[in-house]
Structures are given as structure tokens and as C-alpha cells.
Image (cartoon, rainbow, N blue to C red):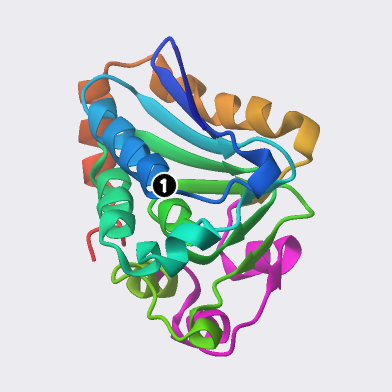
Amino acid sequence: MIDLTKDAGVWTVTLNRPDKANSLTKAMLEELAQIASDAAGNAQVLVLTGAGKVFSAGADLDEARAGLATDDVWERLSGAIARAPCLTIAALNGTLAGGAMGMALACDIRIAVPTAKFFYPVMKLGFLPQPSDPARMSALIGPARTKMILMAGQKIVAEEAFSWGLIDRVVEGEVLIDTALELADHARAQSPDHVAVMKAMIPSSHHC
């Protein structure tokens, strides 16, 4: 359910559970966190994407009811991505919902297809968001818009997400991965150490 390809310094991770809208089980989250950790020193670029029309609907419903919604594995995953010294790119092939937002917020760059929607219905469900997500989101789009998503439960379309700064580019689906790889081109040509040093020079909201 998690596919990983490695090509000349670029690791591409694909959520591959399209029949379940790429909803995430604990095992999938653990695997993703391990890949993000393994990328340190071994990859210049880490790309996250999904199979099908949805990037991820968030937690697998059965596992969410059994406690996954409040498990610390979500925070461990977003933390591993935020700490990764490589360039991290979320290539969002469709809608991003719920706890799955955390891994995209932790990436350096987010690109998305025009049909993508963004929502995080924790208020409606009676949960709190993952601890780092509100600060990372607020650093990107400001506190009021963060409250629009987290507290008012608004579903944001790609065009609005782009104008807010939640995503950095809107890209047609057929060229989504090509665009991600184009963004990876310069970094993949350098050593992981060079990429890490340059990334460390750039102030980031990820350390919140």
C-alpha cells in the first residue's frame, strides 16, 4: 500500500490504496515515517504522491474508531518529514483530508491538481488536530485562515489554497509527477550534504 521508487537521488513515495481513497492505516503511517527517516543522508529529494483521484482521505475509518485518530504516529510522521535534510515535495494528485494534511504541511513544497480540495474536519468529529499541524498551517496561511479550516471546517479548493499559500503551484494531473521531478532536478544533481546545508540556511516553519 506504500510504493517506493529510488532514482538518482530522488525517492518517490506513492500512497497506493486507491480503492479506499488512500486512507491511512497505522502500518502505512509507520512505514512512511521510516522512509522519511531513511531518506536522511541517502536522498536529495523526497516526493510524496498518491495513486488514483485522491491523495488521502486521512485515517482509515475502522482504525480511526479503534484509536488511530489520536495516535502519536501522525506526529512522528510529520516530524520525520520536517526533519528530513533533503528537499521534500508533496505532489498532491487529489483531495487532501484530515490527518493526512500533516505530512503535506511538513513538506518544503506542495503542488496540487486543480480538482484537489483541502479540509480537516476535526472540530466536527470532536478531535484535536495533530499537535504540530496548526502551527505549520498558520505559518503558511496565517491564523485566521487556519481557523477557517480547523475551527469553521471549511473545504478549500485548489485555486483558493494557492491564493492563500497553502499550496505553491496548481498543476494538471498528467504532468504532476513530471513537474515534481523538474523541481527536483537541481537538488538531485548535488550531494545530500550540499542539499542539507542549503536547506538548513532557509528559515522554516517546520521546527514549530
Q: Is residue 104 above or below residue 47?
A: below
Q: Mark 1 falls on what kind of element?
A: loop
Which quarter of the picture shows residue 173? top right
Q: Residue 56 placed where, x, y %?
A: 58, 51
Residue in the image at 79% along x and 40% along y = 172
Residue 79 in the image: state x and y as whole percent: 26, 52
Question: Please, is residue 53 above or below residue 1 in the view?
Answer: below
The picture places residue 26, in percent across and down from the top left corner, at 37, 49
Residue 150 in the magenta stretch? The answer is yes
The answer to whether residue 112 is visible is no
Q: Is residue 115 magenta?
A: no
Density class for disc 1 (Cα within 10 Å; few <14, some 14-19, many ≥20) is: many
Quadrant in which residue 91 is drawn: top right
Q: Amino acid at mark 1?
A: Asp
Expressed as whole percent of the image width and height from the top left, the position of residue 111 reads 61, 46
Pointer 1 residue: 108
Q: Which secondary structure type mostly characterizes the magenta part of the structure?
A: helix
Question: Quadrant where the C terminus lies?
Answer: bottom left
Q: Is residue 9 left or right of residue 90?
A: left
Residue range highlighted in magenta: 139-168
**Picture residue at 30% right of the left edge, 67% below the top:** 132
Residue 87 is left or right of residue 40, and the answer is right
Image position of 23 with respect to 164: above or below:
above
**Residue 83 in view (yes/no):** yes
Observer-nearest of 6 and 121: 121
Q: Residue furthest top?
A: 8
> Who is closer to the viewer here, 179 or 22?
22
Residue at image location 54% in from the left, 82% down from the top: 145
